[in-house]
Amino acid sequence: MIITIKVSKMSDFKRPDGRKNDELRPMEAKAGIIKRADGSAMFKVGNTVAYAAVYGPRELYPKFLQNPGHGILRCNYNMMPFSGSGERIRPGGNRRSKEISMVTEKALSPVLDLSEYPNAVVDVYIELPQTDAGSRCAGICAASIALADAGLPMKDLVAAISVGNLNGNLVVDLDKEEEDIEGEVADIPIAVVPSTGEITLLQMDGIVLKDELKKALEMGIKSCRKITEIQRKALKDKYKVDAKSEGE
Ligand code: ADP
């Protein structure tokens, strides 16, 4: 059953879960959670949970896919069959997961330097056991921590969030209930390199005015700077634990 909620503009606008327009859902991140992977992380935003595991750099097969100039980043996004809000999701790739895998690669590549790894591939597997919108952004946040956890050369982390327009009200971090609101709704997932403000992912589903888009991007960049603090803390916490267990 699809429940649609009407939202009116401006003064009487309240988000369904009572958050302020620029308020993110509660977030949690952890690095180094999958021991056999070269790097791994969990990133949770509200009820959306993403796990990322990095394997590599390792030699890329078949060989015709290799690039002798530098290594290649390969991402694989997957929602688990029981992770959605309703029907079971058919396992395996589909058009949506292919698209999200591709934009995830493009969002992360600008910070990653694989020039020292010719003919190699770095595989990032992103699995979502639970989703409530914002899953591509949660996947990018988890993958970015996992790549850093793998010790790969990176200029910075990448943080991602969706910003949106709910009938003229600009909000950050839409949940599924908000994405399904009736009327003029725009969902704009963005990924940002926090140190430079460079936008490495910009998609849009819906309609937004030029000025609204500008404001929404500003809100998104600000949110990404907050998210990156959580990402950094996850990495620092992991090394604290590692150092402690080495000392024992
Ligand atoms: P994002 O998760 O990045 O916001 P979408 O806008 O495509 O991506 O999807 C919004 C939300 O809709 C997802 O997070 C998920 O909760 C839900 N969803 C997407 N595809 C399916 C599906 N095939 N079955 C059930 N729920 C889905």
Image (cartoon, rainbow, N blue to C red):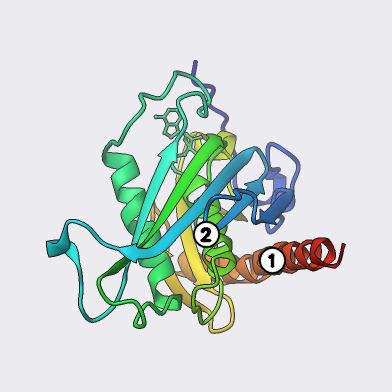
Q: Position of residue 190 (x, y in %)?
A: 47, 62
As drawn, 43 above or below 149: above
Residue 10 in sight here: yes
Residue 202 in sight here: no
As drawn, 201 above or below 99: below
Residue 107 placement: quadrant: bottom left
Residue at 37% from the left image edge and 49% from the top image edge:
76
Q: Position of residue 32 (x, y in %)?
A: 64, 56
Taking the view exactly as shown, the residue that stands out farthest to the front is 248
As drawn, 99 above or below 247: above
As drawn, 184 above or below 165: above
Residue at 74% from the left image edge and 49% from the top image edge:
26
Name the residue tied to disc 2: 38
Say left or right for 35 vs 77. Answer: right
Residue 238 placement: quadrant: bottom right
**Nearest the camera: 7 or 194?**
194
Residue at 50% from the left image edge and 34% from the top image edge:
180
Q: Earlier in the sequence, mark 1 or mark 2?
A: 2
Say left or right for 161 vs 200. Answer: right
Label 2 neighbour load within 10 Å: few <14, some 14-19, many 20+: many
**Nearest the camera: 180 or 78?**
78
Name the residue tied to disc 1: 235
Name the amino acid type tagged 2: Asp
Report, in whole angstroms, how far the alpha carbon at label 1 lies from the one at label 2.
14 Å
**Nearest the camera: 106 or 179?**
106
SS state under label 1: helix
Q: Position of residue 158 (x, y in %)?
A: 53, 69
Taking the view exactly as shown, the residue that stands out farthest to the top is 1
